[in-house]
Image (cartoon, rainbow, N blue to C red):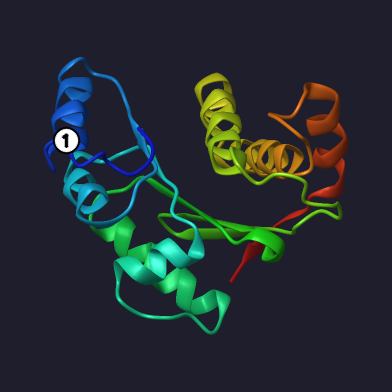
Amino acid sequence: MSGSLPKQLPETFYLDIAKMIQAQGADFIIDTTGQALLDTLPLHPLVVKPNNHELADLFQTTFNSDQEIIDHAKKLLDQGAKHVLVSMAGDGALLVTKGHTYKANAPKGTVINSVGAGDSMIAGFAGTFMKTGDPIESFHIGAACGSATAFSQDIAVKEKIDKVYKEINISELS
């Protein structure tokens, strides 16, 4: 589930869908902001993906370091998320899990169109995680998908993703 809720929909729309998904024994991913995101956390989403600005807004703060971002991402874990992906544009991305934090560098390239980059990141993560169960490799591919889309006119093609993948390094932060 992704995006801001249109005003015509009830504020519980994502929560209602998450409950239906969970009742079927499936995982869900959510990329939204505010109360709609917070309401779904007790249902343990597989992934939540705020960008650093959305995460700051969620907690009514500003960030001056990666560590502050990580500390707030851990709050989402404490409230129920299984994995937190935080995209940070030219500063790369973070994956925060129970007990581990990883950072992906931002590959070099010209941003042509960032529309769909976050969705591409989630798609890369989700598709890889469903195949492998490996959050680190899923993060690596997700970061490549997001960056490759940002460097493309439209959604990135596999060849572009493969090229960008080679430029991304994942490091574990202490």
Q: Residue at x 79, y 43 (%)?
A: 151
Q: Residue furthest top?
A: 24
Figure disc tally: 1
Task: Please determine whether, in this image, residue 92 is positioned above or below residue 2.
Answer: below
Task: Please determine whether, in this image, residue 137 is positioned above or below residue 92.
Answer: above
Q: Nearer the viewer, residue 81 or 92?
A: 92
Q: Quadrant of the N terminus?
A: top left
Q: Position of residue 112 (x, y in %)?
A: 77, 46
Q: Position of residue 72 (x, y in %)?
A: 38, 70
Q: Dividing the picture into quarters, in which one does residue 57 lie? A: bottom left
Q: Is residue 82 left or right of residue 141?
A: left
Task: Classify mark 1: helix, strand or loop.
Answer: loop
Q: Residue at x 50, y 22 (%)?
A: 130
- Amino acid at pointer 1: Gln
Task: Please determine whether, in this image, residue 83 is positioned above or below residue 106.
Answer: above
Q: Residue furthest front?
A: 8
Task: Please determine whether, in this image, residue 32 is positioned above or below residue 46.
Answer: below
Q: Is residue 78 left or right of residue 83?
A: left
Q: Is residue 143 left or right of residue 123?
A: right
Q: Quadrant of the C terminus?
A: bottom right
Residue, disc 1: 8
Q: Nearer the viewer, residue 130 or 147?
A: 147
Q: Residue at x 83, y 41 (%)?
A: 164
Q: Residue at x 81, y 53 (%)?
A: 107
Q: Position of residue 105 (x, y in %)?
A: 74, 59
Q: Position of residue 30 (x, y in %)?
A: 35, 39
Q: Dividing the picture into quarters, in which one does residue 14 lie? A: top left
Q: Please rate how many residues cluster around mark 1, counting C-alpha atoms within 10 Å: few if below 14, some from 14 to 19, many from 20.
A: few
